[in-house]
Amino acid sequence: MTTLQEAPVSHLRENPFGIAQAQLRRVGDTFGIDDNLINVLSRCKKAVEVSIPTQMDDGSTKVFAGYRVTHNIARGPSKGGIRYHPDVTLDEVKALAMWMTWKCALANIPFGGAKGGVVVDPKSLSRRELERMTRRFTSEIINEIGPEKDIPAPDVGTDARVMAWIFDTYSMNKGHSVLGVVTGKPLAIGGSLGREEATARGALYVLRGAARKRELSLNGATVAIQGFGNVGSYLARFVAQDGATVVAMSDSGGGVHNPKGIDVEAAFAHKREHGTLGGLRDTEPISNDDLLLLECDVLAPCALEQVINESNADRIKTKIVVEGANGPVTPSADEILEQNGVLILPDVLANAGGVIVSYFEWVQGLQEYFWKEDEVNAKLNDIVTRAFNETWATYETRQTSMRIAAYGLAVQRVAEATVTRGIYP
Ligand code: GLU
């Protein structure tokens, strides 16, 4: 029996690709970038849609829809994660691919932008089903990816285990191990030390930079974090290690709250044991929506897009928003937060740590020479701090938002590469 997966009601209120294109036009106007170039950059270079027939454990076959989109390769091979989520759409993947281009350019690493996605709830599949689906998806996009072409990585709903299956499927087809085809791999098969925590570590470095500028000490600051995946969980740990009070945390099932502070290590243990944060001792339940409205010094949306939007932006009571997720604040919410004096540390800066250490993993794989964790973290700090300082300087000189400053620097770099190379033929 074959069934086609139906998409449930989406978390996306606005078309994310429309948002990404509008942001690009605003950057073009602010920085006086040639309209012809903006037209080129507002489209994705390539989008591939595949169907992924997958045998279920009960013998039935389900067909999933999958996408891989390359936005731009002017500065190097395209780079970006693969997302497994029931709300994935082609336009979402296109927006995420465009943001990857800006993220890599802002970090000044030699990659363009890409993203992939499969319309699936990975939690609804068994381990074997997930493996079969991943391997079939990989073989459907095998001609699109490669170490000098397009390099996937983890994103929402995927992890090192999924990357291992992608690596193995690609390598089996080539007849030899190809370490550089995917990043975020397990350490046993060529992953990098520090990659697992890299996105959160990068966010911490950006937050430390911003706190210094705003004369706010992280020691004693109150922090609310939405999402307890790869980014949110480690960010909670890192800010707590810096002395911050984590007042709320959440996962897709809801949140937990304690104004006096949550024991983050106990939260890790609770999540490991029960699969959810709900019921964590010394906390009260709080919804994901209400968590965003808490009074706190730092709010870190680390889950999905558009959670801060027109409907709640004027009720956000924080000093700094650090975007651990991609696209968590809509443009209209951006304006409202700006008017209210909230500093937004944009995704392309705040969550760039992941792709930066992916770059290190790719380099280590190509050279078959692996670095110590301290070396990885120090190099990450160098790149993130430089990107933060450049963005802050642009933010001050241009009197614009941190987002427009960050996108502006990035778009100018991609535009320069495009002009220098010339439009083929
Ligand atoms: N998916 C992550 C992001 O949005 C990481 C991408 C990568 O490492 O290539 O930045």
Image (cartoon, helix red, strand yellow):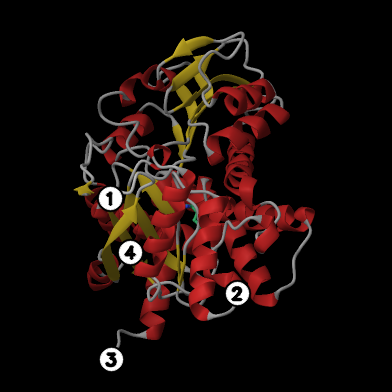
Residue 212 is labelled as: none
| Dot 1 alpha-carbon crowd within 10 angstroms: few under 14, some 14 to 19, many 20 or more | some
Residue of label 2: 177
Q: Nearer the viewer, mark 3 or mark 1?
A: 1
Instruction: Give the side of residue 405 with respect to residue 262, left or right.
Output: left
Labelled pair 1, 2 in contact (Cβ < 8 Å):
no
Q: 181 or 137: which is nearer to us?
A: 137
Labelled pair 4, 1 in contact (Cβ < 8 Å):
no
- In this rendering, is residue 378 above or below 125? below
Please provide percent x and percent y for residue 331: 29, 40
- The quadrant the C terminus occupies is bottom left
Instruction: Give the side of residue 209 with respect to residue 326, left or right.
Output: right
- In this rendering, is residue 269 above or below 301? above
What separation in Å lies between label 4 and label 1 (alpha carbons)? 23 Å
Please provide percent x and percent y for residue 214: 58, 33
Which amino acid is tagged 4? Val
User: Who comes first in sequence, dot 2 or dot 3?
Assistant: 2
User: Is the residue marked 2 within 8 Å of ligand 1, measured from its CB?
Assistant: no
Residue of label 4: 69
Helix, strand or loop at mark 2: loop
Residue 62 is labelled as: 1
Q: Quadrant of residue 378?
A: bottom right
What separation in Å lies between label 2 and label 3 (alpha carbons)? 35 Å
Q: 235 or 233: which is nearer to us?
A: 233
Q: Which residue sits at x=34%, y=66%?
A: 71
Which amino acid is tagged 2? Ser
- In this rendering, is residue 259 above or below 30? above
What separation in Å lies between label 3 and label 4 (alpha carbons)? 23 Å
Helix, strand or loop at mark 3: loop
What separation in Å lies between label 4 and label 2 (alpha carbons)? 24 Å
Residue of label 3: 425
